[in-house]
């Protein structure tokens, strides 16, 4: 589904991604871990098409198409979804209207008819129940005045509504207490199926207790320096990142 | 009377005024004509303001002052032209003024006569002398304001509206001012006087627009008098051509416990200056001022407001919002005076702007002068760019960038327009704004 090869990206003069390689197959859940400043969120942003970054090298293939050649909205329409670390407040636009516009734009892109009001409402009720989000929240301005937990839950709700193929969760656990984390993780787990894949970017192993990954990659200094299964995450939880940093840094010196 | 003199505008106006005086046939001693002469003298002394004048620092009328306009322009505007200036679901009391002159055959009064008296200004001296004598030019400043002086001297027509005490007008009053410049450069001066009786209530709109491609100059003055417990919603709506100079003053005088709500929405106009001045001369008065302007191209839109709190226990609240695109310019100047007597005043002012290009500019100036000590006043102005993070957020959900920008701007504009209580005007504006923001190319 997704193949990232030798991806380099920088912001202004600072090179942040320095040759990322990995592949995501349908139905897989990949966790990207790493210390602060390792490039985790950059990777998520670059995949979603944030313009602040300049791609200096490498390719990203998504279902046979060149992802890097697409605008953010085209990527969304092709089936990529980014759950933001800091969801944006948009005064005056309700979640309902926002999603109605988003869904119908995506459908238009894919040559499908718009959902009518009844179809949209049906899907909304279904998905709101699935991710346990309160209907009244959805009729308010998007994320405006929402608590941290409500914002993250709204991200998962949007994800459910848009039915993407590849979901990228950027530090979705940040700022959540354990109850909120559990609700969000449950929502994500309900969306898992054999065709939908996930890239879960997180600093802590905690989230991975609830969203169990198939693969864990450790990012450090813009490269994946270690890959493994969920046990790697447990090891990181226990030992921290220092041993990996030391390993890599000693190699660099050598 | 020939109006085109190929001279500067001031000279033309002075000559026009002299011609008018000759036609008065002995009526020149009537109080109103005395007043007009006095106002003309003031205009002659003041002349058109230059940018050295503090109130006109950012709005330069020198180009206007060099032009000539036909202030006596006729118009063959008729019923068949109405579809060109369609307002959706238009109902209520609708009055048409073409090039500043009332057109009875297009107009329509619905409300009963014991509720609403409406008389064209040109006939008001004969039909409502008591109203003219008591209120005309009592509030708008024809001594120091050149355009108000000019209007007071020379306005030909407009409307005098009187809402009887204790009457709530169900149907709105919609005044449509149409500049018909299909044949020539047109000048028009409109004068309105709106008297809202004790405990009476009205919703009133002034809707300005143009048809045709020639130049247009409109100079308007509207005076509002709100008696005790009166309530008025007032909407000034502007959709005029890029070849228009629109200078307008709305002067409001409020008595005890009255309520005034103004929304000034400028969708189009080449050079627009709106003055909204409110005097709160009583206790427990509420005044609300909302504004929205969405200039594109090289349009220039200037809103000056003045709120004068003279008595205790009143509240004023102001929110102006602007979206400035292309190379447009905007001005907001908001004065709040709280006089020594006006204890327990609450006065709020806020002006928020979004500038969508590097070439558009907005000048804002709040001016608070407070002589009372027990008051709550606040003001704030912001001018920012579009929120790129919000646009990316929307794009990441599949919404194209152009649409994301449009949605964001519509949402920004929404809270001014959504409050409008005349459905026809609200729908009209929503349509215009959607169209205008929709044309935002990216």
Image (cartoon, coloured by chain):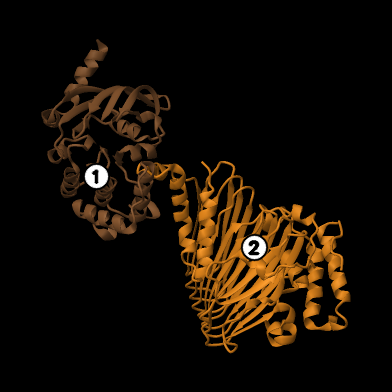
Looking at the image, which is closer to me, A157 or A231?
A157
- Mark 2 and mark 1: span between their CA atoms? 53 Å
Q: Is residue B132 above or below residue B69?
A: below
In the image, the chain rendered in brown is A
The residue tagged 1 is A175
Which of pointers 2 and 1 indicates the residue nearer the eye?
2
- For image coordinates 29% across by 56% down, the residue present is A119
- Tell me how many marks there are: 2
Compared with A187, B183 (above or below) is below
Q: Which chain is orange?
A: B
Which label is found at residue B76?
A: none
Please give left or right for residue B49 compared with residue B109 in the image: right
Q: Can residue B41 be seen in the rendering of this structure?
A: yes
Q: Secondary structure at mark 1?
A: loop
Task: Name the subunit of mark 2.
Answer: B
Q: Give the residue pinned by disc 2.
A: B209
Q: Residue at x 79, y 55 (%)?
A: B67
């Amino acid at each position: 589904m997704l193949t990232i090869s030798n991806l380099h990206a920088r912001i202004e003069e600072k090179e942040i991604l320095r040759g990322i390689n990995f592949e995501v197959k349908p139905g897989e859940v990949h966790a990207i871990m790493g210390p602060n400043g390792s490039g985790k969120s950059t990777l998520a942003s670059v995949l979603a098409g944030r313009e602040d970054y300049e791609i200096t090298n490498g390719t990203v293939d998504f279902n046979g198409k060149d992802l890097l050649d697409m605008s953010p909205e085209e990527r969304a329409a092709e089936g990529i979804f980014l759950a933001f670390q800091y969801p944006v407040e948009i005064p005056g636009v309700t979640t309902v209207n926002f999603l109605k516009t988003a869904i119908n734009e995506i459908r238009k892109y894919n040559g499908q008819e718009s959902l009518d009001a009844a179809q949209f409402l049906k899907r909304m009720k279904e998905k709101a129940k699935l991710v346990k989000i309160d209907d009244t929240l959805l009729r308010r301005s998007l994320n405006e005045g929402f608590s941290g937990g409500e914002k993250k839950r709204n991200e998962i709700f949007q994800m459910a509504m848009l039915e993407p193929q590849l979901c990228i969760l950027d530090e979705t656990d940040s700022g959540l207490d354990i109850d909120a984390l559990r609700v969000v993780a449950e929502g994500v787990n309900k969306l898992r199926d054999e065709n939908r894949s996930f890239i879960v970017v997180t600093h802590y192993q905690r989230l991975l207790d609830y969203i169990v990954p198939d693969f864990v990659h450790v990012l450090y200094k813009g490269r994946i320096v270690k890959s493994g299964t969920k046990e790697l995450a447990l090891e990181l939880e226990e030992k921290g990142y220092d041993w990996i940093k030391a390993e890599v840094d000693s190699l660099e010196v050598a | 009377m020939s109006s085109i003199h190929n001279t500067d505008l001031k000279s033309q106006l002075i000559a026009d005024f002299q011609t008018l005086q000759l036609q008065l046939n002995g009526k020149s001693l009537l109080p109103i004509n005395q007043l007009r002469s006095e106002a003309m003298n003031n205009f002659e002394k003041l002349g058109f303001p230059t940018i050295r004048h503090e109130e006109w620092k950012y709005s330069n009328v020198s180009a206007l002052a060099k032009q000539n306009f036909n202030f006596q322009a006729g118009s063959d505007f008729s019923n068949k032209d109405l579809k060109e200036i369609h307002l959706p679901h238009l109902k209520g009391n609708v009055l048409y003024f073409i090039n500043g002159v009332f057109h009875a055959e297009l107009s329509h009064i619905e409300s009963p006569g014991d509720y609403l008296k409406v008389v064209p200004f040109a006939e008001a001296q004969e039909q409502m002398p008591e109203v003219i004598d008591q209120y005309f030019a009592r509030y708008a400043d024809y001594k120091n304001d050149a355009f108000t002086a000019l209007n007071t001297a020379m306005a030909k027509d407009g409307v005098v509206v009187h809402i009887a005490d204790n009457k709530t007008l169900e149907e709105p009053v919609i005044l449509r001012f149409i500049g018909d410049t299909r044949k020539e450069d047109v000048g028009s001066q409109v004068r309105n006087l709106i008297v809202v009786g004790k405990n009476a209530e009205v919703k009133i709109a002034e809707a300005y627009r143009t048809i045709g491609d020639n130049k247009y100059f409109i100079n308007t003055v509207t005076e509002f008098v709100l008696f005790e417990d009166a309530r008025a919603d007032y909407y000034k709506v502007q959709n005029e051509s890029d070849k228009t100079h629109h200078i307008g003053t709305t002067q409001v005088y409020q008595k005890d416990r009255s309520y005034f709500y103004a929304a000034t929405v400028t969708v189009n106009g080449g050079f627009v200056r709106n003055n909204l001045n409110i005097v709160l001369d009583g206790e427990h008065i509420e005044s609300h001022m909302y504004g929205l302007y969405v200039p594109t191209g090289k349009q220039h839109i200037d809103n000056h407001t003045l709120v004068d709190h003279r008595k205790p226990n009143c509240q004023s609240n102001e929110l102006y919002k602007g979206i400035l695109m292309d190379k447009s310019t905007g001005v907001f100047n908001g004065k709040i005076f709280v006089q020594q007597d006006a204890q327990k005043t609450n006065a709020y002012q806020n002006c928020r702007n979004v500038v969508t290009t590097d070439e558009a500019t907005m000048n804002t100036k709040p001016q608070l002068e407070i002589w009372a000590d027990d008051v709550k006043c606040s003001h704030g102005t912001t001018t920012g760019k579009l929120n790129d993070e919000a646009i990316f957020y929307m794009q990441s959900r599949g919404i194209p960038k152009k649409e994301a920008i449009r949605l964001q701007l519509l949402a920004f504009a929404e809270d001014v327009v959504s409050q409008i209580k005349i459905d026809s005007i609200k729908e009209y504006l929503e349509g215009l704004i959607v169209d205008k923001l929709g044309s935002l190319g990216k």
